[in-house]
Image (cartoon, coloured by chain):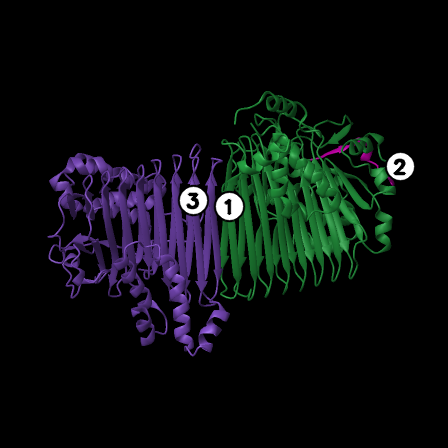
Amino acid sequence: MAATPETAQQVQEYADDGYKYGFVTDIETESAPKGLNEDIIRFISAKKKEPEWMLESRLKAYRHWLTMPEPEWQKPDFPAINYQDSYYYSAPKSMADKPKSLDEVDPELLATYEKLGIPLQEQERLAGVAVDAVFDSVSVATTFKAKLEEVGVIFCPISEAIERCPDLVQKYLGSVVPYTDNKHACLNAAVFTDGSFVFIPKGVRCPMELSTYFRINAENTGQFERTLIIADEGSYVSYLEGCTAPMRDEHQLHAAVVELITLDDAEIKYSTVQNWYPGDEEGRGGIYNFVTKRGACRGRNSKISWTQVETGSAITWKYPSCILQGENSVGEFYSIAITNNRQQADTGTKMIHLGKNTSSRIISKGISAGRSDQTYRGLVRMGPKANGARNYTQCDSLLIGDTCGAHTVPYIESKNKGAVVEHEATTSKISEDQLFYLRQRGIDEEAAVALVVNGFCRDVLQQLPMEFAVEAQKLVGISLEGSVG
Amino acid sequence: MSQKINPVENFVSGFEAIRATLAGNDLPWLDSLRRSGIGQFEDIGLPGPKVESWKYTRLRPLEDTTFRPVILADREAYIDQVPTVLPSSSGCPRIVFVNGFMRSDLSCLDNLPEGVTVESLGAAVARDSEWVETHLGRIGRLEGQPLVALNTAMMNSGVVVHVQRGVVVEQPIQMIFIAGLTEEPVACYPRNLIVMEEASQATLVKLHAGLGVSAYLANAVTEVEVGDAAILRHYRVQSENIQATHLGSLHVRIGQDATYDGFGLHIGGRLSRTEVFARLEGEGGHCALNGAYLMKGREHCDNTTVIEHVVPHTTCSEVFKGILDDESRGVFQGRIVVHKDAQGTDGHQSSNVLLLSDKAEMDAKPELEIYADDVKCSHGATTGQLDETALFYLRSRGIPEALARNLLIQSFVAGALDEIKVDTVREAMMSKVVHWLPAKCFLAEEWTEE
């Protein structure tokens, strides 16, 4: 297919303003000195006014981190990270004396979120979604707190949770992702700054969707947030996560850890739209998104469902997983990953079946365009006691253009004859017939591609909560702009 | 035997000890090839669990056993009856090796057609060392392959098959490797070379058979060149003995419009790993890599394949079926790589496994690595147990449970065996499968006769 002048123009437009969240908020910040050492960790802990046990656990993680080698098994190829060339704590100055309510929050910050499409004040009054907004290293605002507390739901920044409910935090933090898990999770355990804490008490169905919006703003700053969600017996919560960052020429590190815990009959639905700055078309800049997400279905009949739309980041390294311990527990993973230009993504899931009659379902859709490289890497493990366990995996890859790569690397380990594992994968390109059909109906090529890709992703898009689904569909189109021709 | 030893040093010193006795050691090119092999092996060492492609297979027997080189007495072991794949009555030519060395008294190569040479590596080197030099070590790369490197250093014998341009060999040729029957653990390193010139056709049937119960290591490397428009049907059976470690690798280069049709049946060996590296280097090439493995006891069977589509318009297919009983373990790692510009590639892979016991384990890693867009590639992998409803159906028709199970297993494995294009070979392999089946009853034998 030869590039038409129109597509060439669109490519140019895309290069100019494809990433609309790339602006920088000019705000006075307070940072820890550059680099990483025990003093920095003490500084972060002191800033957060943390109890002694928290500092101890951070230092323990840091000392272990020093001994861990860089992981090398992944497909993405990138120069070694200089951990000393980054700030590990950065917070808007105005946040130093903790605003009590939204009215006291720096208007500049509120304006930033408004620009990102998350009007915090309006949301407080109109939309039925509670938001925790995290800006660099601190949470700037959490909406609907009072209303949630009426039903006993705790939704607050994790730093506040450490003060308010240390028992819960101490009991569950690090119980799903221990600090020894992997190098990036270990770094997070040492230097995590903020993130959300959610506790849904027994039998409560959370009355609204909870959401966290992560924003990296400061230069040379890594963001290390930590999210902990606990769903007590018979409870339900749907949680959304969004993220963006300004356009910068250097790479920034984002190493987050998310831990989910469901007890008997509880359910957590966790949705992510990840749209970190992906770097420019030559691969300059962009976020290194090295995230460890894991949920433990501890109780009987519990369920954890991950849905993700991954369109941003220079490099994505992310495997939201489920440990299915409780009998009849269910794990789900729905993923759309789109890479364009020089992006690299190595993403997938792990389903570890330990309990009887556990079941899991994996639907992964990968779309690569430009000169990007994408890998689905997934593990399904059937333990010796997982009688009657079932897994179904389907991963499909779509290639747009002949300079990108799509890879599928599933690991299937079965130690139980009563467990059934099924895996299917296909790789193909967009059907010429479908494109031709759409074009002869007067739909231009870009729109036709977006339509076909949206159809390809339908199974996953359907899993997203309403407002996310609309945004995700648009994102699919935007991410692929300029990829045809 | 149980004391801690350094296996790498052991192998290296073993090489120094036997170097002077190796076939063709007076040829400078061969000597330097062997030296580079041992050098590479020393650098890489034995693959441990941290090496991604060895994640599921540990080479424990190599770590805690000292294997000595084969001596004359081992080579001259008395063989009562030569194990074969095809019945002796078929009159197919055969070349037989005992503990890695050719035995002309057991071989039968009289009725080979014109234009076909089948001989031992030693004989080939002695007869035409130049020809061997241009082919040996050209396809099997040493880099990052410690076992290929080790074999390159130690290779002493093996079979060389050369089919000249346009020659079509009707009768299957059998290559039989017998091992075991030694007092102490021994190691043998067969190195095979198969060269199919343009438009030639042949069927090769290879058998690795273990006799007795003594431990041994068979580290085999086979290099195969399938010339333009040539067809090679390459069927292998691995039935090593219960103490054996069988590490085989197969390196195949497939030319334009050529077909390589490979099948491997694995029914033995304490620890076996078969690696196949196939490269489709000419348009219109086709590669089929199929296999079946039936494991019991504490056997461990690993099938690792890498098929590379280098040029446009090539196809591949893989069908693997596994049966795992007792505490056995199966590993399947299949990778299909589509290089940039290899448009029009069609590749399909499937791996299906039945677990017959709660202690059996299967680890599968089917991979697709694709750098071109106009391709059709897919893989499927399943593990599960025998279908209870099918079993119930058979029993409700008055078939006893043991036989019903056997029937179902047999039909499951047949899904892979059906890929074998030569009837006599397929039937011979099926009878090996039937022989393996648990709770044998005479009816099962009868059933296959029909």
Image position, residue B260 (x, y; %): 31, 45
Look at the image and tell me whether residue A383 can be seen.
yes
Residue B107 vertical placement versus A465 (above, below): below
Of residues A250 and B129, the one nearer the viewer is B129
Judge from the rendering whether residue B171 lies leftward or rightward of residue A369; answer left or right. left
Q: Which residue is mark 1?
A: A426
Mark 1 chain: A
Q: Which residue is mark 3?
A: B347
Q: Amino acid at mark 3?
A: Gly
| Marked residue nearer the N-terminal end (2 or 1) | 2
Callout 2 and callout 1 share a chain: yes
Of residues B112 and A328, the one nearer the viewer is B112
Chain B is which colour? purple
Q: Amino acid at mark 1?
A: Thr
Mark 2 and 1 residues: CB-CB less than 8 Å, in contact? Answer: no
- SS for callout 3: strand
Magenta stretch, residue numbers: A89-102
Judge from the rendering whether residue A301 lies leftward or rightward of residue B85; answer left or right. right
Q: Which chain is green?
A: A
Image position, residue B138 (x, y; %): 27, 37
- SS for callout 1: strand
Q: Which residue is mark 2?
A: A103
